[in-house]
Amino acid sequence: MILNLTARESTVTPEDGEEIYDLIQLHRLLNESKWQFFRLFLGGKRRRCLAIVTDHSVPQRYFFVKLLCLLARSRERAIVDWQGRSMPVDWGSFIAKDIPEFIGDAVLSVWVLWRSLLRVAWYLRAKPTRPTIDGTNKKFYYFRTGVFYGLKAGGSVGHITGVAKNVIACGYDLTAFAIEKLTFLMEAGVPVRGIPAGRAFRNFLVIRMFDFHLRFAAALKKIAKREGPPAMAYQRLSLNDVSGVEFTRKFKIPFILEYNGSEVWSSRNWGETKLALTGVSLKMEEVNFRHAHLIVVVSDPLLDELVGRGVDAGKILVNPNGVDVQIYSPERFTREELLETRRELGLAEDAVVAGFIGTFSPWHGVEVLAQAIPLVHRRVPELRFLQIGDGPLLHGVKRTLRDAGAEQTSVFTGLVPQMHGPRLLACCDFFLSPHVPNPDGSRFFGSPTKLFEYMALGKGIVASDLEQIGQVLEHEKTALMVTPGDVDELADAIVRLANDKDLRDELGRNARAEALEKYTWEKHVQRILERLEERVGTR
C-alpha cells in the first residue's frame, strides 16, 4: 500500500497489484465513513505500507501518518520523501518519542491558543493607527508568513517575485521575511531572511500557525529595534496571522495588506479537510482588515466581499495581477533554443502545441480540459498538449486521457522551477486557460497570473469567459472566449486555433500589446505606492 500524502504524483513505483491512495481519495474516504477509512488499514495483510511526504528535512506532521502505517498489517512500514529518503516506522520509537511529543504539544497548545485569543480580542477593540510615510526612510519589509515549506513554482511565486522586484525598482531597500529563505526570491536578486518555526506543534497545524506567527512578530520587532524600522510593511495575508498588524502598530508605520481570498472559504470549498477553529481564523482576518492602511485585492469580487464584511471601500485597491514582460517575452529565446526544448520534451519540431501551466487544482479547470482533449484528438489528431505543473488533480487528468485512449496527445512535465516556465511556454503555439466557476456558486475571485504570462508571450489564447478573465481578454481580439465548464465549446475553440495560424498570431500580437500597456508588475507596484501615499501622506 502506498499513501501519497503530497500534492504531486507518487515518486514510488508500485509493485504488481499494489494500491496507491492519494490525498483526495483518503480525505474523501475519511469524510464519507471513518469506519471504512480505518478498515482500509486494518484489512488484509500487505508486504509494505509506505507514506510519501514532501521533505524529511523540514518539520512534518508525522504522528497520524505513523499511526496509520502502524495500523496497516504490513511487514515493511516507512515514510519516504521526494528525495527518496526513508524513515522506518515501528511501535518502539512511536511509543518512546512520538506519543510523548504529541501529549506535550497538546498541553502546550492551550497556552498558545489562549495567547492568540487575547491578541485577537485586543486588536478588535484597538483603534487603528494613523501613520504617515517617512520620505527619508527607504527600508521596506515584505512578509510571507505561510507555515509551509518548499514553495518553488505557481501563481503566488510569480506574484511575490513581481511585487518584490518592482518595489526595489522604485528605489526601496526591500527585505523579504519568511519561514525559510525563499530560493526563487534570492535567484531574482531579492534579499530574504528566514525566521524558522522550529519543531513545536508539528502535529497540530492550526496551533503551529498561531505559535509561528507569535514568534515571527517577536523576531521582527527585535530586528527592527536593532537595525531601525522600515518606512512601511507589506504582507501577503496568511491563515491565522496578525503578525503584520502587531509589527506595524509597534513602530507606527503604514501597513499594506495583500488579500487574495479567504483561506477559510478555500478550505471549505476546495480543500478535502476541514480547518479547526475557523471562527478564530475569521476574526484574525477581521483584525487585518481593521488595521491595514491599504488593502490590495486582485479582483472586483474580492472588493465586494470585503465591503460586505464591513471594510471601508476607500482603503481597498483593486489591482489585477501582472507579468514581467522581459522574462515572458516572445523575443527572449532563439528558434534553436525552442527547438531544442521541444526535442527534450519529445515534441516534433513542426507539431502544433497547445500549452497549459498550473498547479492542477480545482479552479484551473483541468478536469474539463481532460474531457475536451479526446474530442479535439478525433478532429486534429496531430495536435499535442504540453501540460506543465503538478497538483492534486493531475492523476485524475491522466486517468481520464488514458481511459479515452488519448494519453499520447499530452506531455506532462511535472512541477518545474519558476525560472523554467517561460522557456517551456515559449515553445508552445497557443495557450489554454479553462478556469471553472466556484463550486458554491459564489463569484470567481481569481486573477490568474498565467493569464498575463500567456498574453506577454504574444500567442493565441483559449480562455474561460469568467469574471476578470473575461474583462481582461476580449473575444476575437486577444483570445477566444468560451463558456466556463463547457467541454464541447472548449474543444471547438482549441480546434479552431490549432487550424488557424494567422488567427493565433493576430490574437497574440493584440494580447501582448494589452499586457505591455496595462498589466506589468511595474505598473502594479506603482499603483500600490501611489494609492498608499494618497491614503496616509508623506512627511
Image (tube, rainbow, N blue to C red):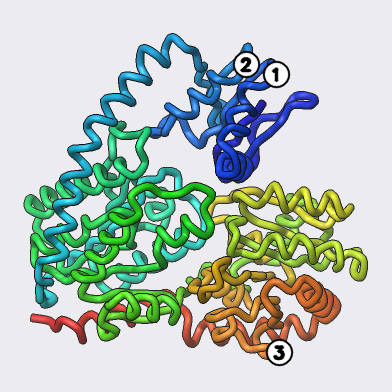
Residue at 61% x, 73% y is 454
Q: Residues within 10 Å of mark 3 (few under 14, many from 20)?
A: few
Depth order, front residue of 111/529:
111
**Residue position for label 1:** 44
**Residue position for label 2:** 73
Residue type at tag 1: Gly
Q: For the residue labelled by badge 3, is the local secondary structure a helix, a strand or a loop?
A: loop
Residue at 57% x, 73% y is 451
The numbered mark at residue 380 is none
Q: Nearer the viewer, mark 3 or mark 1?
A: 1
**Residue position for label 3:** 476
x and y percentages locating residue 363 in the rendered image: 58, 64
Instruction: Name the N-terminal-most of marks 3 and 2.
Output: 2
Q: Nearer the viewer, mark 3 or mark 2?
A: 2
Q: Residues within 10 Å of mark 2 (few under 14, many from 20)?
A: some
Depth order, front residue of 443/420:
443
Q: Is residue 328 at least partly visible in the picture?
A: no
